[in-house]
Image (cartoon, helix red, strand yellow):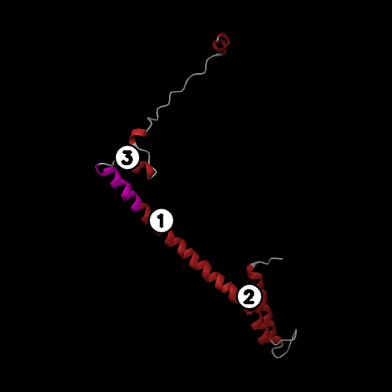
């Protein structure tokens, strides 16, 4: 059964504090308080390591976002240069290969909707 992340940490803290307060020299389960702390230390160590990695991941994602913005600016600069370079321009194969629509392939955008013929006209046809 999976436990909430804080549940284990809180329970371990309560066990250690209670044991330390009420019976610091007693042994339970065949171990002393110090041995119990050493035996359960991995839980806390892994949690701390995961927290550090999550923080690093957040930082790396922010760096990736900044790098992506810089890359987009560079790609925009290159495509603008292709458009403006004699012998290439906005109608060349390179421009199309870069993922852009060449100017000579633009569509006007004008749409003329046809009216649906009336039923009477359909019956005559």
Specify which label sits upstream in the sequence, 3 or 2.
2
Give the distance between the C-alpha atoms of the residues marked 1 and 2, in whole angstroms.
37 Å
Tell me, yes or no, whether the highlighted magenta stretch contains residue 75: yes
Q: Which mark is residue 68?
A: 1
The answer to whether 95 is drawn above or below residue 49 in the figure is above
Q: Main secondary structure of the magenta part?
A: helix
Left or right? Give the position of 20 relative to 74. right
Q: Is residue 110 visible?
A: yes
Question: How many C-alpha atoms fall within 10 Å of the one at disc 2: few (<14), some, or many (≥20)?
Answer: few
Q: Quadrant of the C terminus?
A: top right
In this picture, which residue range is highlighted in magenta? 73-86
Q: Which mark is residue 109?
A: none
The answer to whether 69 is drawn above or below residue 103 in the figure is below
> Residue 46 placed where, x, y %?
59, 73
Left or right? Give the position of 80 relative to 27. left
Specify which label sits upstream in the sequence, 1 or 2.
2
Give the distance between the C-alpha atoms of the residues marked 3 and 2, in whole angstroms.
61 Å
Q: Which mark is residue 43?
A: 2
Q: Name the residue under label 3.
A: 92
In the structure shown, which secondary structural element does the residue marked by tag 3 occupy?
loop
């Amino acid at each position: 059964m999976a436990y909430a992340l804080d549940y284990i940490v809180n329970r371990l803290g309560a066990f250690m504090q209670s044991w330390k307060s009420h019976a610091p020299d007693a042994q339970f389960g065949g171990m002393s308080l110090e041995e119990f702390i050493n035996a359960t230390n991995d839980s806390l160590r892994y949690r701390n390591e995961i927290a550090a990695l999550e923080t690093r991941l957040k930082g790396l994602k922010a760096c990736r976002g900044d790098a992506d913005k810089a890359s987009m600016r560079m790609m925009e600069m290159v495509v603008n240069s292709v458009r403006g370079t004699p012998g290439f321009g906005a109608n060349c194969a390179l421009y199309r290969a870069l993922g852009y629509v060449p100017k000579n392939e633009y569509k006007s955008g004008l749409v003329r909707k046809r009216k649906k013929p009336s039923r009477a006209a359909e019956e005559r046809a």
